[in-house]
Amino acid sequence: MINFTNTKFVKSAPSLKEAPQGMFPEVLLVGKSNVGKSSLINALCNKKALAFTSSKPGHTRLLNYYNVDDKLYLVDAPGYGYAKGGFDLDKLFGEMMEDYFSNVTRLKMVLVLLDSRRELSEDDLEIIEYLQSKNIKFLLTFTKVDKINQSEKHHLLMILKEHNIDPKDVVFVSTLKPRTFDALRSILQS
């Protein structure tokens, strides 16, 4: 059993070479710059300020490692789909993820975070298709589910079906509804 409240920030690494040297499985979090990866980490671990949240997208530019109960690492990757002031996060994301997926040996799963209020973007579909093509286990994690109704949720599931995504590979969460994280915690422990 994993105690998610026993989570601590370990380090930020600009590349896989500088990642923590541990033998824990890794759960990588990817998503658009403003999808709420930091908020998800905080809610999942029931800690308000474990991961830094920013009102400005594009804050994460490194791989941020969180040790969860000496059982696994949560790895927060830079967001994609955002560029500001000449800084191309898509390029950073692409380079960092190519290195990560080519060299990591302890990847348990990828959480692809998606805003439940938005249509899937080309970037979202690209990362999903990439994971499918490489047979990398992933879980689509729709955030902000409190902002949609059952009809909109059903519509999302129908769109996913068109992209050959099994409903068992989907979870819906909301930081305003802590119980929605129970299913995610259960999946991460299996």
Image (cartoon, rainbow, N blue to C red):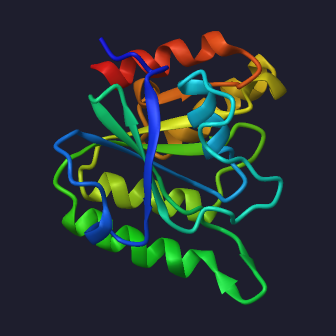
> Residue 172: in sight, yes or no?
no
Q: Is residue 90 left or right of residue 153?
A: left
> Can you say whether 84 is above or below 86 in the image?
above
What's the residue at 22%, 68% (across, down)? 102
Where's residue 169, x and y in %? 42, 31
What's the residue at 59%, 61% (across, down)? 79
Quadrant where the image shows the C terminus:
top left
Q: How many marks?
A: 0
Q: Quadrant of residue 179?
A: top right
> Can you say whether 26 is above or below 86 in the image?
above
Where's residue 49, x and y in %? 67, 36
Between 24 and 28, which is closer to the camera in this rendering? 24
Residue closest to the far bottom: 86
Q: Quadrant of residue 164?
A: top left
> Residue 149: in sight, yes or no?
yes
Between 182 and 148, which is closer to the camera in this rendering? 182
Q: Is residue 50 left or right of residue 9?
A: right
Between 182 and 123, which is closer to the camera in this rendering? 182
Where's residue 135, x and y in %? 24, 50
What's the residue at 56%, 18% (across, down)? 181
Q: Is residue 142 left or right of residue 187?
A: right
Quadrant where the image shows the N terminus:
top left
Q: Quadrant of residue 101?
A: bottom left
